[in-house]
Image (cartoon, rainbow, N blue to C red):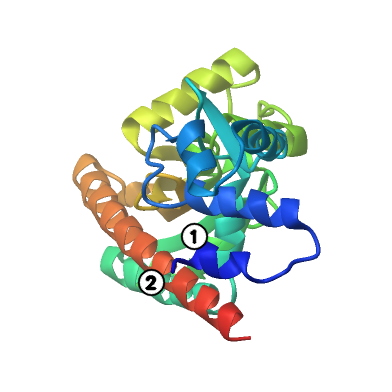
Amino acid sequence: MNDNETMARVRVPVESLRKGLDLLEILCGPEAGRDGVPLAVLAERLSLKRSTAHNLLKTLCVCGFAGNVGDGRYRPGWKVPQIGRQALLGDAGVVAVTTVAAEISVALGEAVVVAVLVAGRRRVVARASGTQAIRVDARTADGGDRPIWSTVTGRVLAAFCGEDELAQVLQAEGLPTAGAWPGVTSRRALAAVLAAVREAHGAEDQGNGVASLAVPVLSGNGSLLAAVGTFLPGFRYGPGERDHLLAGLRSGAARLGETLARAGSHEGAAIHDE
């Protein structure tokens, strides 16, 4: 007997809600992939009429928890990874991220910041100071109250989130100002530079004697989890150092992705135990 069959024996106050959650559970499972799950398969799995399954999925789509990819196929919506990020950043997640950020900082010798995107705004989760005698203060370089567009971590988060979540960012932050991201003050210009960030798989910036680099932290299915960035005095930033830092950041991002996945599993187990 599978979990759905077990649940079917338990009465719940709102049956339609459970059906919607059952659909969401399948959409978030391994069989969905990038191509999604056909409506016919979803209806059959839950013993639903196609019309019922379609109406439930339409509601999930309108609310952002499912997405219609065409040809009657569905996958998780843009709000699902956002909720996942919030869940991953419980106590266990924050401790784990802070530990890995410190390890990355020691490996690079420079200041490190890890940030996530929640409700259209950048949230700094962890900072580490670096080991160089002359170094950049992580809090000053990437403070939590700075506009998302003025930081490399924020630019990476905006570049790698989905369209609906980017709309949230624009609603919360507006377009970049000339001071936050010079030359990027229109939707067309923003789309072009964000595409360039995705192509480079990271963002970099130099100004006021500080060089900064950031890369995305992605889940196993390629969805955005976080961004990790490093900051250093501009006089140390040459081509060789840039390559070394990028390699270290990408290695650290992979470890952060694995760490967040484990932390998320622990959080889920703790919630289940309660």
Q: Name which residue type carries label 1.
A: Val
Mark 1 / mark 2, whichever is N-terminal = 2
In the displayed structure, would residue 234 be above or below residue 85?
above
Q: Name the residue: 71% across, 33% down.
A: 62
Q: Name the residue: 67% across, 31% down.
A: 167
In the displayed structure, would residue 234 be above or below residue 130?
above
In the displayed structure, would residue 1 be above or below residue 136?
below
Residue 221 is situated, as x and y percent measured from the top left of the image, at: 37, 47
Which quadrant is home to the N terminus?
A: bottom left
Q: Name the residue: 30% across, 57% down.
A: 254
Q: Name which residue type carries label 2.
A: Val
Question: Within 10 Å of the Cα at label 2, are there few (<14), some (14-19), or many (20+) other Cα atoms?
Answer: some
Give left or right: position of 104 versus 241: right
Q: Which residue is mark 2?
A: 100
Circles 1 and 2, Cβ within 8 Å, touching? The answer is: yes
Q: Which residue is mark 1?
A: 114
